[in-house]
Amino acid sequence: MTSEKRGTFGRIGIWSSALHGSRTDDAGRGAIAEAVAELEELGYGTLWIGGSPSVEDAAALVTATRTITVATGILSIWDHSAGDVAARIAAIAPGARGRFVLGLGVSHGPMVPQYSKPYSAMVTYLDALDAATPPVGPGHRVLAALGPRMLKLSTDRALGAHPYLVTAEHTAEARAALGPDALLAPELSVVLDTDVDRARTTARNMLAMYLRLPNYTDNLLRLGFAENDFDGGGSARLLDALFALGDTARVKARTREYLDAGADHVALQILTADEGGSGLPRAEWRELAGAFAGEL
């Protein structure tokens, strides 16, 4: 991947499951459009639409912005056929289509009744995207990847990888597996709260669901955590490794750990005590943009 292509992602992006226009009413879609316009103005490099979005969700944000990259983070291959995805991408206005990146993932067995042979299913899906008219080739997609095989596939068949819920140590391992040229854009969840106990409670409220999914727990076990680190929504050791908890200086330091470990781009997900990751935390987005001034 060229350095020019890497640069389209910027160093810092925003990951949010609240950016689904298809999940809300007209007023909600208007609020999303206002929020993404401000995120673009603040200077963030990429918007990652979390929570199994569709191409339509991304197309709406591409239309509502002018320069920012928009990516699905992550579209499930079980929910959308490759042919339909390719057709819907082709329907995005040509002048805006270049700012869209298709993030793809295999989701999780407990969430997908038809889940089977996820690696083979992803290969077949990528083959279908390559064969579509027009194709959605490697230069327009990234893969959700945690383990070695999917990371290798991210290098061979995509721009690179978008790992979710990972440590800085995993980022270093992922960079080694991907090689120097592939994009590495991990997600990092953030709680802007200097009360450590309260911040950890907010993080646990989000993390508890993911600790029921073997893809994540298996990856954490590979990284050296133990089964008892998953008890009660996550041990302090696990939370401190997976999240950025504290003030903006702490968030900047944690983000730097991921960048120093080999990430090209870090997608920040803001969690708040009242909404988890489900709202539009515009005040926090502004605060972080100010803290990262000149670095976005």
Image: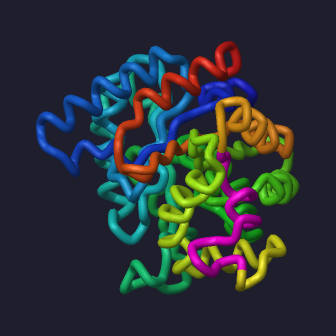
How far from the left and from the top, in percent, is residue 59?
A: 32, 37
Residue 291 location, quadrant = top right
Q: Does residue 242 show up magenta in the picture?
A: yes
Q: Please state if 159 lies on the left or on the right of 91 as rendered.
A: right
> Height in image: 149 above or below 3?
below
Range drawn in magenta: 229-245
> Height in image: 292 above or below 2?
above
Residue occupying image coordinates x 30% and y 56%: 84
> Height in image: 277 above or below 211?
above
Q: How many marks?
A: 0
**Most prominent secondary structure in the magenta stretch?**
helix
The residue lying furthest to the left in this view is 26
Residue occupying image coordinates x 68% and y 13%: 294
Colour basis: rainbow
Residue occupying image coordinates x 75% and y 42%: 254
Residue 277 visible (yes or no): no
